[in-house]
Image: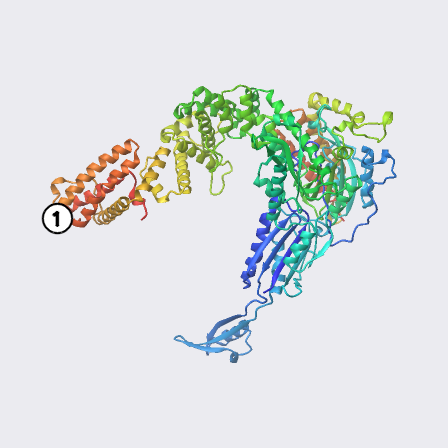
Amino acid sequence: MTEVALLSSPFALIPIPAVDTVPRDSTPPREPDLTMDASLPAHMRPERSFQGFILALQRFWAEQGCVILQPYDMEMGAGTFHPATTLRALGPKPWNAAYVQPSRRPKDGRYGENPNRMQHYYQFQVIMKPSPPNLQQLYLKSLAAIGIDSAVHDIRFVEDDWESPTLGAWGLGWECWCDGMEVSQFTYFQQVAGFECAPVAGELTYGLERLAMYVQGVDRVYDLNFNGRDGADKVTYGDVFLQAEQEYSRHNFEYADTAMLFEQFKMAEEACKKYLAAGWREGGNQKQHLMALPAYDQCIKASHVFNLLDARGVISVTERQSYIFRVRELAKACGEAWVHTEAGGAA
Amino acid sequence: MPDLLLELFSEEIPARMQAKAADDLRRMVTDKLVAEGLVYEGAKAFATPRRLALTVHGIPVRQPDLKEERRGPRVGGPEPAIQGFLKATGLASLSDAKIQSDKKGDFYIALIEKPGRAAIDVLAEILPVIIRTFPWPKSMRWGARSAKPGSLNWVRPLHAITATFGLETEEPDIVKFSVDGIETGNTTYGHRFLAPAAIQVRRFEDYEAKLLNAKVVLDPERRKDAILTDAKQLAFAQGFELVEDQNLLDEVAGLVEWPVVLMGSFDQEFLATPAEVIRATIRNNQKCFVVSDPKTGKLANKFILVANIEATDGGKTIIAGNERVIRARLSDAKFFYETDLKTKLEDRLPKFEQIVFHEKLGTQAERIKRIERLAAEIAPLVGADVEKAKRAAKLAKADLLTEVVGEFPEVQGLMGKYYALAQGEDPSVAAACEEHYKPQGPADRVPTDPVSVAVALADKIDTLVGFWAIDEKPTGSKDPYALRRAALGVIRLIAENNIRLNLLKVIPKFVVTLLEGDAVKSAESPIAIAPSLLVFFADRLKVQLREQGARHDLVDAVFALGDQDDLLMIVRRVEALGKFLDTDDGKNLLAGTKRASNILAIEEKKDKRTFDGAPEPALYSLGEEKVLAKAIDEVKAEASAAVAKEDFAAAMSAMAKLRPPVDAFFDKVRVNDDDPKVRENRLKLLNEIRSATRAVADFSKIQD
């Protein structure tokens, strides 16, 4: 999938990597039994509750040695924007993390009327650097952990090259299909923020609502059982998010203050550049940067503001390219700063 | 002689790359073997989603020994030369060298024998290089090794290499090498889900058989056959017919190692959506086949999917899952279609004002206005109703802004037709919405409805004139705007519809029409565009005629007449000329004309003058001269009249009458008479032969 601009297709999944059945150059991973535990109560079970679904994925990836992070506290179009992916994918240091990231795609709002298209949804993101040799296998096991049995489901890795013009990033991988449905994206990052990834990180993105709908057998996202309870205690996805979808659709398409947003874009861009300029230090023989993360926050901000402006339809086709270019320049400069920080691998 | 088995086992290889990769592997390995003096008997390569495999059989055990004689310095030559010779050839002393004598003297000769190496050692040397330099369209790095520069690039992570070499009767050896930490061996793996265990293999025969046991069909052709046969049967068993689709079959066969064909269905109500949209939805998004009802030829509410596993529930879950996705996709498509129907095509046009067609060629709206003006101008020339052509030109692009076309670009035009019909447009107008894109290539159908023809011509000529105006002409292999295709489209529209257009006259007018207003930022003056565009048409026509099998020299012979401005007439002339030259009369007349031309060329050079002008009848002294002169006059008149009536066959028949007098003339008459006046007159007569034949073609361009 090509992630055009900051937005990608509806319900878009971020690219995720897959693992092979046959790692040749690695020791076999530990194999705790992560298939569904029948003793779990319904509110914790992946096939009964949306929350159980997320918990099962978190538990599975925690067992693989991932740091389980919480969502980043900023609005962003995809889990890839989380600094735990964008920035941590750069530099030589190993990094394994998994987290849920709310993804905001203002243009995809449908006032709550479309069964599976929303301006806010969840992605589950896994990043492993360097990509382990059995990443495909791990991915398939994670599916088993959320109730997708490869003995009855047709799971396929279908070519899908990923590119994010706004992040200056690209990678190769697949869309992962389950019975004809794209459920995840699997990407081996080759370049991020204009830098070669060395080593390469593997990235998995699960479209949580879509997968949960399939596992729960519902056709409308708002009908998902969120908490796994029945009767009066049951809370659906619609109970949690329907009103928000209606309100935000109104906001994104009709009322978002474009004058303010244009101003915010400029401010974020300027702030980003200012923090980047202020962060450089000469340390020993090497340049160091001391404010890559705050600067990158402003890049995330600019990107989301651009998406809102785009949804409001106030950006022309030619301007669009120039906005994308401006965000990419910020992302690249942040990447440059990051590789001069300690976590980015500078001495 | 021993055989090689090579398998490169990786994560899923994109379907579209597999066939070429297998071919590249075979070619690279066998080319290298031959270059190393190892001539093999046969080779075959295969690809599945997870492996590239190659078998080369009948490779000699060793390279042939090489014997080489190297000539050294003269006997008694300078010492440094002799030392250099010994060093270069590895000889211990001059006593090991032979002495050879020739007329220049005695020379030292070294006999160098290079024993051939074992083929397995050669393989161990060439295979890793091939793997490292394999031409994947896109390749990647992965894993811990990608931290360092120089790690292996492969299409997706490579996990194992099987490489064995040996005789059928013996346990084969492993061709030992390693690439980026992957050591060769004889272990591969079966189907990802059905039989993932490791498999030990010896050589190709047991390799292929063991894979089959492990639920991997190695040969893509076998997978395609299996899919096609099963899909047809499954459809037939339910009273349907598979809608075959070779590209989809190729792709699907590259997505599975163990094809299992299943059938699912969708709600009847979706069939109200146009069949092409259903098919595009099911095919593009889901990579499934559609089926039709053999009685009506219409789509049925079924689809055929190809799974990669034999599911323990017989495929129930897989079918249900696919049906679910297809239902969602079809409801989207249906929704798009129904939404599209709510807006009239003309109401979409204002949006085109915001869409830039090309930076220097203005917006789509401006382009549509240009096409509209030009279509109105072309309509009377092709027998189309002007108002209909204008209407069609106005609406033809509107479907680009519809939801369905946004989703499935390949149904552009077709949807325009549906929407035009739905809003009650004239059938010709609706047809033109679809057909104005045609012909898309040499194999595509050429529209015949005059309204379609007018808009199709206007669309293509606008493109050509526009890109000519901003100087974006095709160069060499670069033709990003497909201008050659557009010009060929114009040629085919004209030739196949027998349209008379004097391009020399109309193109400059069209240029003026198109460049009216200031949408096009023309870098060239309108006067300069037409002639260069006409040359381009002539070149495309030549290519087209050649591709249709016309002799290129005949094409040149017609073009050499100059002022050929009517494409249709050029085509006709070339055809008639070809037929004429197949006859004896044609061949002999050609020979006679050439002879006349050759003599003239020599004499013109000698006298440094031409022999134009009418011969003087009073100077004819022989009967053959008079007969020829008379025949030329008659033939000229007859041929010109025939050409004027555009009856090229008749013109050629007239030409045929020249043959006997020309033959007789050369037989009896000596051109270079002693009397200079007679000589000049005879040369003028020869010149008349040449000019008479120019009524149909320039015979001097025709090859014998």
Please tell me whether residue B371 is drawn above or below residue A198 in the rendered image: above
Q: SS of the residue at dot 1?
A: loop
Query: Could you tell me the amino acid type at mark 1?
Result: Asp
**Residue B240 visible in the displayed image:** yes
Residue B568: x and y in percent read 37, 33
The chain holding disc 1 is: B
Going by the image, does A60 lie left or right of A168?
right
> In this view of the protein, which residue sits in the foreground, B193 or A177?
B193
Residue at the image position 15 percent from the left and 44 percent from the top: B625
Q: Nearer the viewer, residue A290 or B543?
A: B543
Colour setup of the view: rainbow
Q: Nearer the viewer, residue B505 or B58?
A: B58
On screen, residue A24 above or below B2: above
Identity of the residue furthest to the bottom in this view:
B95
The answer to whether residue B528 shows anywhere in this view is no
Q: Position of residue B200 (x, y in %)?
A: 70, 58
Q: Quadrant of the N terminus of chain B?
A: bottom right
Q: Quadrant of residue A193?
A: top right
For label 1, the residue is B675
Q: Quadrant of residue B524?
A: top left
x, y (%) of residue B641? Answer: 25, 32
- Where residue A320 appears, as percent x and y from the top left, is 63, 30
